[in-house]
Amino acid sequence: MNPELLSAVETPLPHGRMITSDEGSGAVQALWMSDGPVTAGLWARIHAERVRTGLWPLLLDSRGVHDSEFSPWGSGELFPERMSSPDIHDAAGLLARWWKNYTTIGEDDDVLSSEDRLAVTAPFGRAWPGLAPAHRPSTDPDTAAVEYARHFAACRPQARLGLVAAGSGANALTAAGWDGPVNYDNDTAKFSAGVAGWEERFGARVVAVGPSTLHLSVAAPPISAEEALLVAAEHFAFCPDNIWQGSHPFTLAAYAERLVHGRYWDFWWD
């Protein structure tokens, strides 16, 4: 990120610094980060300027309240040099391939039996159901993003502001070199491609991100159980830990119930 981009921001910024990636030569500045917590109002004002500035704002979360370095951001554990371009990846193909991987039991997989694994993804089993249909937003996507930013900042008051040179939240994840899903794939550009599809089909916006979490607002959520099941299948392919470890009982159907009319989507990778 070119530090000169900050001069285009009309909203007064708090004290902060450029974060340099500790990958490679250490010459890449991945993003700008505030030195302390910020309000959702500040995030919203800078978000409103994003088209003119070319900077996407993120609410950044850390590993814990006692993390003095505010990792991974403040410690530079960011790897933009490692990532490919989101533009070269096909979201539909990625989700279908991930679905196949996570519904097939491997030789060394002793966590779930084949029968249990199929029960998790019922009624689809191993058959990839395809992408969920697009929805017309019932509210303005940017308004929904501001509302979720308020909710997130209230729940995580330690969140700091990050500014990334990117035209969308999806691309900001790759440009910043975030590697939250690294235990599944170390190329964040693939996940950016998936998020970009949700930006287009569901009016999703990237609001916040943590070391292994991702938080999206949603302007056009599924409005029926049938639609929610298809969206849940995409979520499982994108982040299987949301279903394997994040809901009770551990089934796609139970997870889908939470998506009906849901205005935000949260993801966590183990």
Image (cartoon, rainbow, N blue to C red):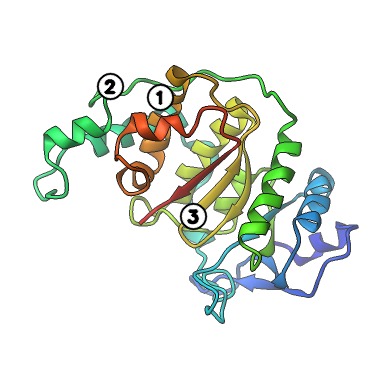
Q: Which mark is residue 123?
A: 2
Q: Determine the residue positioned at 59% across, 43% down.
A: 216
Which residue is the extreme one toward the right?
10
Which residue is the extreme one toward the front?
248
Classify residue 191 as left or right of residue 70: left
Label 3 environment density (alpha carbons within 10 Å; few <14, some 14–19, many ≥20):
some
In front of the other: label 1 or label 3?
1
Q: Secondary structure at mark 1?
A: helix
Residue 104 seen: no
Identify residue for label 1.
229
Label 2 with label 1: CB-CB less than 8 Å: yes
Q: Secondary structure at mark 2?
A: loop
Q: Nearer the viewer, residue 140 or 164?
A: 140
Q: Earlier in the sequence, mark 3 or mark 2?
A: 2
* Tag 1: amino acid: Leu
* Tag 3: amino acid: Thr
* Quadrant location of the C terminus in the rendered image: bottom left
Identify residue for label 3.
213
Q: Secondary structure at mark 3?
A: strand
